Image: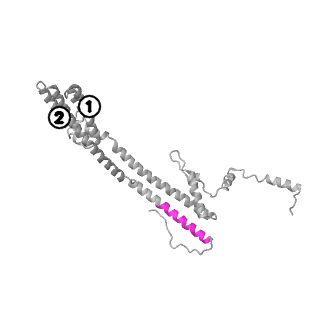
Amino acid sequence: MSKTMSPAQLEANRRNAQHSTGPKTPEGKAAASLNACKHGIRSHEVVIRGRCLQEDNHEFEALHERLWDDLKPIGALEEILVDQIATTHWRLRRALKAESGEITLSVDSGQSQRSNSRPLMRSWFSSDPLAMSINDPIPEMKKSSLGNSILETILEELLISVENEGIISETAVKTAAAVFGQKPNRFIKDLERIRALMEKNADGMDPQRIKAWALSWANSRLEDVLSDKPKCEEREQIEERARQSAQALPAPGVIDKLTRYIKALERQLFQSMNQLERLQRRRQGENVPPPLAVQVSGTE
């Protein structure tokens, strides 16, 4: 039989309820906010939310929830150890991402430096007297797809000039020489030689034969270039893949730093897991012997 409360008792209950409206101070509200949490640690204490680097707090919370459900901690000590396991695993994942980023940076920067054609072109086309006296750039140009592409453009422009003027003109020779910064080379010497022969025999040769001779010479050189270019491209692609594979490791200093960091995290992770297991077995009534070995940490 239920007891009927008197009006005085109801009024007393209402007055008491006014004194239980929750915490008033910021500290009290912060403490109460943890009541609805399944664990004490929160994502904003672990997850990086910087301007350039932003980790996913929902991903961390999901990881923590899975570990909590799997390990089922009871009591403050077990909860602290589960927190340590979650945060250490999260930091290990971050270290692996850092390693991936270092490798990507190394490979990409190396590829960018190799694709920069300016140093190579300066060595071919320099007008510096010392550089001009060193060697002929044509053999080196024919060893690369870039060099063959430049020679291809020069020869195509020469063919257009011969088609329009009927000969290898002085202007065409000067235009080609300007590309090389007036650096002497076999290609320009051949142009000058053929042009001199054409001028010497201009009165005795049919203009159409002179034009055909000039076109034949330029087309022959262009065919050589077009034959060499795809071979150079294939070789360069193979070499570039090999260089990228060779750079698929962080720099030595970075490797050392990452290795020490990852080892420290792994030790912390295994220690937390071991301590949690021992606490849970002891709580379940098992006779847990003391650890056989004591691990002493120190500077390496």
Q: Residue at x 52, y 62 (%)?
A: 269
* Disc 1 to disc 2: CB gap under 8 Å: no
Query: Residue reaching furthest left?
Result: 204
User: Which residue is labeled 1 in the image?
Assistant: 157
Residue 114 occupies quadrant: top left
Q: Is residue 60 above or below residue 170?
A: below
Amino acid on which the number 1 mark rests in the picture: Glu
The magenta segment: 263-282
Q: Where residue 128 sits in the image (x, y, percent)?
A: 24, 36
User: Which residue is labeled 2 in the image?
Assistant: 190
**Sequence-wise, which precedes: disc 1 or disc 2?**
1
Crowd band around label 2 with a 10 angstrom C-alpha radius: few (<14), some (14–19), many (20+): few
Which element is circle 2 on? Answer: helix
Which element is circle 1 on? Answer: helix
Q: Is residue 215 above or below residue 71?
A: above
Q: Where residue 56 sits in the image (x, y, percent)?
A: 55, 50
